[in-house]
Image (cartoon, grey):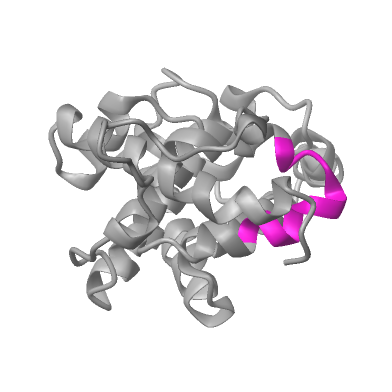
């Protein structure tokens, strides 16, 4: 091992840190540096598992998704073009692998959401209390005391609607990105997102009324 190798390996953890330049990180990983690779995995596995769990709601399946994601990331690193940040690129791969597992287990099949849609009177007016104009689910999720209960309500949605809500409102992907990822039309994505938001609002109504959940 040369002196240059020693110096490079000693600084590998710093080169992989949050403030590291994406191009430098990719170059270091592509060089086959084992220390850098280990640091890279350890630095990213936490948030990758958290993203996958939002979609899969199963620790074992999330671990499989993240493992598959890392395999794909390392295979494709040399083709990373820097059109987005490295983390954004990795995020997309994690989501895709999570969705692949959902499809494998047939969890994206069509399920009805009609029971969770708003109700209307004979004049076409929605039954809705005056308090019903409340914060968005995203803003409510910032309040730690509500977070677990809101996640429970999101998880109560059928997967084919829950996933679109997560992709658009939590992962903040565009309608076009979601449509491409799920193989749907943009119109279909918009309709399902509207219905998912309406259903979630209905599920959150007891919380907003101050009732126990």
Inspect the magenta stretch and tell me whether residue 199 lies in it.
no
Q: Tell me if residue 3 can be seen.
A: no
Q: Residue furthest bottom?
A: 60
**Does 38 appear above or below 176?**
below
Q: Could you say where residue 82 lies in the image, as x and y percent from the top left? A: 45, 20
Q: Is residue 60 left or right of residue 168?
A: right
Viewed as shown, does residue 211 lie left or right of 32?
A: right
* Residue that appears at 86% across and 53% down: 145
Instruction: Determine whether 14 is above or below 67 in the image.
Output: above
Q: In the picture, residue 206 is in which quadrant?
A: bottom right
Percent coordinates x, y for residue 19 in the rendering: 78, 26
Task: Count every numbered label the image shows and give the total.
Answer: 0
* Residue 4 to residue 213: above or below: above
Q: Quadrant of the C terminus?
A: bottom right
Query: Does 148 lie within the magenta span?
Result: yes
Camera-side residue: 19 or 177?
177
Q: Main secondary structure of the magenta part?
A: helix
- Report if residue 65 is visible in the image: yes
The quadrant holding residue 118 is: top left
Residue drawn at 42 percent across, 61 percent down: 157
Residue 91 x %, y %:
50, 42
Q: Quadrant of residue 175?
A: top left
Please give the range of residues in magenta. Answer: 140-151
In this rendering, position of residue 213 left or right of residue 156: right
Give the camera-side residue of 18 and 64. Answer: 64
Residue occupying the far top of the picture: 83
The residue shown at (56%, 64%) is 53
Residue drawn at x 33%, y 69% as measured from the top left = 101
Q: Is residue 138 left or right of residue 173?
A: right
Q: Which residue extends farthest front? A: 122
């Amino acid at each position: 091992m040369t002196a240059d190798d020693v110096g490079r390996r000693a600084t590998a953890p710093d080169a992989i840190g949050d403030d590291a330049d994406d191009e430098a990180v990719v170059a270091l990983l592509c060089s086959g540096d084992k220390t850098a690779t280990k640091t890279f995995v350890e630095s990213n596995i936490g948030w990758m598992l958290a993203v996958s769990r939002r979609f899969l709601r199963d620790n074992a399946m999330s671990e499989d998704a993240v493992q598959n994601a890392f395999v794909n990331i390392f295979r494709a690193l040399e083709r990373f073009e820097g059109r987005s940040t490295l983390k954004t690129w990795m995020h997309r791969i994690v989501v895709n692998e999570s969705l692949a597992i959902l499809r494998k287990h047939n969890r994206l099949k069509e399920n009805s959401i009609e029971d969770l849609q708003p109700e209307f009177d004979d004049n076409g007016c929605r039954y809705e209390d005056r308090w019903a104009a409340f914060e968005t689910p995203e803003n409510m999720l910032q309040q730690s005391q509500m977070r677990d209960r809101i996640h429970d309500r999101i998880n109560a949605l059928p997967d084919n609607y829950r996933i679109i809500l997560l992709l658009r409102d939590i992962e903040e992907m565009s309608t076009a990105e979601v449509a491409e990822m799920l193989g749907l039309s943009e119109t279909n994505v918009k309709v399902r997102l509207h219905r998912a938001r309406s259903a979630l609002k209905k599920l959150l109504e007891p919380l907003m009324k101050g009732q126990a959940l």
